[in-house]
Image (cartoon, rainbow, N blue to C red):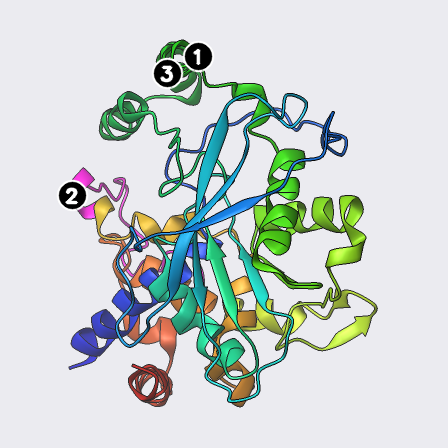
């Protein structure tokens, strides 16, 4: 019973926590300065074309979909154009606020539309009770055109993972593959240099103009927060709100008290617990056993999941998604030897409360 409930809960947690994970195709790169604001050589008029939704529409929703058509490179507005796929979710309020929320997903490279179901489950429906909610795939991402997806690199990524090679070996193998993808995109006439935060900020402002909104609210996750800062710097007339993470006590301005988040994280004992302390041998693990919790190790403890979690807003004693995900990481680790100790004597209450909360919103 205990194991069944754990699996039921944590399988849900993994799916919800997309926004707090490293992208699957991440490779370490030096930080680059944010590009300067884009200044088109001539005035361009953004165009929104209605179209069918290209992604899987979450059950119970009927978004209005289409493509925002913008210059690939705004320094050459007469040149190549690109299409960004957009989904507009209508507010459930009979008299909604006129300023919708635009979701800026992380990565960079993530797909908001591919994660639409989980975005709506993770606080989106609450937003829709007040105003519209707009999801769109940023330039170069999954449902936009072009989609800069390097399949050989993805295949290499999983092969390298299976081989358990060093970071230096990994990079030595990855860079030529990524270089080949870059050359392929350039051969198609794609200007790779135009896929940056400044151009994406201009895309968002063009989306606002094309849809006829005077002002909008930005909801940034991970890299999306950096993009939001670009937008506010370059187009301050079109954005009106910037808020600290919800569900946390505000210390001052945008500074929140993050300590309760880490107290709950520490409560699940985020480390391996071994009963066989006298064993001289290593605790070995197969690749198949490692795959049981592969996704869970990517959490970067950004606290965005807790900020978006409706149960966290209702019950301050609830451990929260990040702590439960980390508990999952160790509970399903074949080397861990004491699940009961990890969650303590009150684990049944925690699981019942968490499962009930998810079921109520299903």
What kind of element bears circle 3?
A: helix
Image side of residue 122 versus residue 32, left or right: left
What residue is disc 3 on? 181
Residue positioned 42% across, 17% down in the render: 171
Question: Could you classify mark 1 by the number of other residues whose Cα lies within 10 Å: few (under 14), some (14-19), or many (20 or more)?
Answer: few
Residue where numbered disc 2 is placed: 288
| SS assignment at label 2 | helix
267 relative to 155 in the view: left or right: right
Asked if marks 3 and 2 touch (Cβ < 8 Å), the reply is no
Name the front one of labels 3 and 2.
3
Q: Does the magenta stretch include residue 282?
A: yes
The residue closer to the viewer here, 54 or 359, is: 54
Q: Are marks 2 and 1 in contact (CB under 8 Å)?
A: no
Asked whether, in this view, residue 233 is left or right of residue 69, the answer is right
**Residue 186 numbered tag:** 1
| Residue 275 sits in quarter | bottom left
Read off the magenta span: 270-289
Give the distance between the C-alpha atoms of the residues marked 2 and 1, in whole angstroms.
38 Å
Q: Could you say where residue 153 lies in the image, as x and y percent from the top left?
A: 32, 23
Identify which residue is drawn at 25% across, 44% down. 283
The answer, for residue 212, to whether it is visible in the render is yes
- Residue 142 appears at what percent x and percent y? 36, 41
User: How busy is the neighbourhood of tag 3: few (under 14 within 10 Å), some, or many (20 plus)?
Assistant: some
Instruction: Identify whether 16 is placed above or below 232.
Output: below
Where 95 sits versus 241, above or below?
below
Q: Distance between the residues labelled 3 and 2?
A: 30 Å
N-term-proximal mark, 2 vs 1: 1
Residue at 56 percent across and 77 percent down: it is: 131
Tell me which secondary structure the magenta stretch mostly adopts. loop
Q: Which quadrant would the C terminus be assigned to in this image?
A: bottom left
Q: Within the magenta stretch, is there residue 303? A: no
In the displayed structure, 170 sits above or below 278; it is above
């Amino acid at each position: 019973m205990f194991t069944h409930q754990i699996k039921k809960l944590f399988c849900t947690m993994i799916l919800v926590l997309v926004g707090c994970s490293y992208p699957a195709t991440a490779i370490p790169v030096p930080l680059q300065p944010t590009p300067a604001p884009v200044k088109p050589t001539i005035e361009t008029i953004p165009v929104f074309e209605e179209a069918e939704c290209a992604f899987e529409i979450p059950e119970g929703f009927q978004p209005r979909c289409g493509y925002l058509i913008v210059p690939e490179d705004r320094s050459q507005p007469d040149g190549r154009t690109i299409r960004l796929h957009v989904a507009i979710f209508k507010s459930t309020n009979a008299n909604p606020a006129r300023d919708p929320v635009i979701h800026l997903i992380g990565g960079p490279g993530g797909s908001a539309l591919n994660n639409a179901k989980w975005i709506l489950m993770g606080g989106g429906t609450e937003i829709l009770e007040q105003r519209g909610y707009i999801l769109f795939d940023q330039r170069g991402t999954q449902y936009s055109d072009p989609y800069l997806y390097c399949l050989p690199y993805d295949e290499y990524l999983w092969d390298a993972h299976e081989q358990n090679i060093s970071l230096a070996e990994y990079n030595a193998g990855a860079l030529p593959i990524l270089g080949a993808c870059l050359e392929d995109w350039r051969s198609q006439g794609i200007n790779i240099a135009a896929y940056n935060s400044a151009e994406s900020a201009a895309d968002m402002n063009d989306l606002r103009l094309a849809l006829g909104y005077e002002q909008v609210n930005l909801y940034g996750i991970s890299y999306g927060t950096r993009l939001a800062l670009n937008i506010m710097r370059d187009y301050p007339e079109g954005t009106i709100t910037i808020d600290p993470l919800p569900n946390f006590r505000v210390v001052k301005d945008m500074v929140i008290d993050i300590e309760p988040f880490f107290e709950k994280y520490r409560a699940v004992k985020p480390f391996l617990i071994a009963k066989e302390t006298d064993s001289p041998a290593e605790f070995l693990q197969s690749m198949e056993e490692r795959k049981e919790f592969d996704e869970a190790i990517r959490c970067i403890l950004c606290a965005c999941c807790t900020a978006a979690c409706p149960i966290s807003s209702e019950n301050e004693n609830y451990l929260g998604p990040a702590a439960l995900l980390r508990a999952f990481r160790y509970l399903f680790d074949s080397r861990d030897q004491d699940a009961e100790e990890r969650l303590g004597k009150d684990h049944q209450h925690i699981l019942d409360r968490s499962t009930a909360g998810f079921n109520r919103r299903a």
